[in-house]
Image (tube, rainbow, N blue to C red):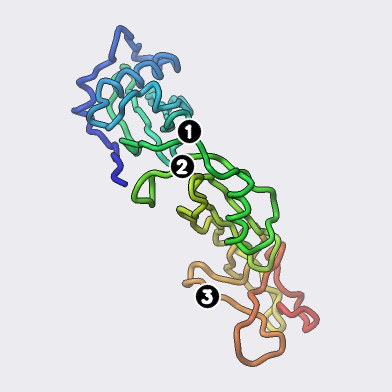
Amino acid sequence: MKKVNLAVTAAALLSIGTVGSVEARASRSLSDQDAVRLSYAALQMKAGDFGIASAAQELKVRQVRHDFLKHTHVRMDQVYKGVPVFGEQLVTHFNRQGQLYLVSGTFAPSIDLSVRPKISPSRALDLALADFAHEVSEAPSVKLVVLAQEVDQPVLAYHLELKDLDGAEPMARVYFVDAHTGMIAWDYDNLQTATAEGTGNSLYSGEVPLTTNSGPGGFAMMDPSRGGLETTDLNQGTAGNGVTYIDADNSWGNGTMSDRAT
């Protein structure tokens, strides 16, 4: 689906000015109320350029933030007939004089679909669990959204995240189950990991530093900085695929043969 990617130039937006009678003082930011009002007015004024039919009906304020420059930023989520449009969000940016100088984000125009599901949330969960094929470590939430990215045409979908964080190989996967057909419209891996510095208690060299991979299930003896190079346990074998070492505190081995990680 073609989306409008909004990174509108300052020259195009400063012509909007303060859109009304607000005179922002140079010593302070816009009030939240004025920033929201100006955002809706400016976006409606430029609705044709952005693909917006009704700013008031298609955008819902998420946050108003003021920075140290006394600039004001209004973050707005796209909605369609009251249903959130996943991942579509606009941010309006005002300078300290109350002038709109930038609109950033993405907006999916021309959505046309029924927002009445044909399958239940529980059925969508069953379909996602069947594909996940793992035990889940926490109860997933199921949210109804409009999905306009990674699809040819927008679809009404149930948005779920399934997590197995207790297994030897933690998994987290996000699913979008079509609320009309029951098909999986899109899914992706969402496991959050990061490089960590651990300690190895070796048999011959004492303590040695180790770069490991941290995740929700603990630490894995895998080095993300070296292309995912990992150390596995072959369980006394000499060939084949071993099991990646997992540790809870990132301190590996005990300096003796009694600990396999040594």
As drawn, the label of residue 229 is: 3
| Among numbered discs 1 and 2, the one appearing first in the sequence | 1
Q: Between label 3 and label 1, give the one nearer the viewer.
A: 1
Which residue is tagged 2? 156
Q: Residues within 10 Å of mark 3 (few under 14, many from 20)?
A: few
Image position of 138 (left or right of 190): right
As drawn, the label of residue 132 is: none
- Residue 192 is situated, as x and y percent measured from the top left of the image, at 56, 56
For badge 1, the amino acid type reads Val
Q: Secondary structure at mark 2?
A: strand
Q: Would you say residue 73 is visible in this rendering?
A: no
For badge 2, the amino acid type reads Leu
Q: Would you say residue 124 is visible in this rendering?
A: yes
Q: Secondary structure at mark 1?
A: strand
Give the residue displayed 60% in from the left and 43% down from the top: 120
Q: Residue furthest bottom?
A: 238
- Do the residues under discs 1 and 2 have CB atoms within 8 angstroms? yes
Give the residue displayed 53% in from the left and 52% down from the top: 175
